[in-house]
Image (tube, rainbow, N blue to C red):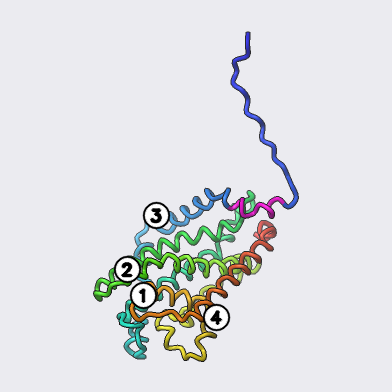
Amino acid sequence: MSDTSPPQPKPRVLVLEPGRADRHYWRDIWAYRELFAILAWRDVAIRYKQTVIGIIWAVMRPFLTMVVFTVVFGQLAQLPSEGSAPYPVMVFAGMLPWYLFAAILGDASNSLVANTNLVGKVYFPRLIIPSSTAVVALIDFAVSLIVLAAIMLWFAFLPSPRILLLPVFVALAVLASLGPAYLITALNVKYRDFRFLIPFILQFGLFLSPVGFSSSIIPDQWRLLYSLNPMVGVIDGFRWCILGGDSAIYWPGFALSLIVVVVFLWLGIRYFRKTERTFADLL
């Protein structure tokens, strides 16, 4: 009688090749895209599942900050708005990229420490872990964008067609945050006190960046130097898209901010990759 048993699957062969992980690192990131989705969905579920304060916090934090900045800078200091936009609209348009930056940087900085068991057990590109935190920040950003639409409707202020370019500047804001996030995340694995510096950096950066005021009030002789802060160009780009009208981008400063974003992204990825092999031992 002939053998009718089904063919047996070929055994898989695991090949250990020196340097393979380094050569195929970016290919492995794409291969582990499902892990990225799982980590991102887990973070979203933790933030919003069976909670009310998660949604409320995403709305109230930027709204209350906008009210404070409008009173302090717009009413008391009598700083000008940008173009014909109402001052609260101008402030909220600047707060959108800042809170996106702050959320990604704050969440990513402790992401490797929070996933110690995962890092120590299996191989995968560790860059996936801090990168996945951007998904929650983008969801909070979408909620804040709805709040901005309501504020603009309240003031009867319509956006210009330039708002169609907003996704470009959203991507730029994400890149501006990921560079420092990779750097601080890697440093936090070895030096755990770095997590205490993040709130100070974000609080200081909030007032150093043109969130509560327009960057046009900076004197011309200092404006290019001021643009070394990468969030200056990002915030100006957001306002240019949303406010339209007389809102303008200071292009030399924007180009400088873009260069700083690229440099920080390169430094962050480079340092993260350089120290990645030691994460499992340090954690």
**Earlier residue among tags 3 and 4:** 3
The image shows residue 127 at horizontal and vertical percentages of 59, 58
How crowded pointer 4 is (Cα within 10 Å; few <14, some 14-19, many 20+) is rated as: some
Q: What residue range appears in magenta? A: 20-29
Q: Does residue 107 appear to the left or right of 49 in the view shown?
A: right
Circles 4 and 2 in contact, beta carbons < 8 Å: no
Circles 3 and 2 in contact, beta carbons < 8 Å: no
| Label at residue 228 | 4
Q: Amino acid at mark 1?
A: Phe
Q: Residue drawn at (63%, 14%), measured in percent from left and top?
A: 3
Q: Residue drawn at (24%, 73%), measured in percent from left and top?
A: 154
Question: Is residue 83 shown above or below 283?
Answer: below
Residue named by callout 3: 49
How crowded pointer 1 is (Cα within 10 Å; few <14, some 14-19, many 20+) is rated as: many
**Earlier residue among tags 1 and 3:** 3
Q: Amino acid at mark 4?
A: Leu
Q: Secondary structure at mark 3?
A: loop
Circles 1 and 2 in contact, beta carbons < 8 Å: yes
**Earlier residue among tags 3 and 2:** 3
Foreground tag (1 vs 3): 1
The image shows residue 247 at horizontal and vertical percentages of 37, 80
Foreground tag (3 vs 4): 4
Q: Residue drawn at (50%, 77%), measured in percent from left and top?
A: 254
Question: Is residue 176 shown above or below 72?
Answer: above
Residue named by callout 1: 92
The image shows residue 94 at horizontal and vertical percentages of 40, 76
Residue named by callout 2: 147
Q: Secondary structure at mark 1?
A: helix
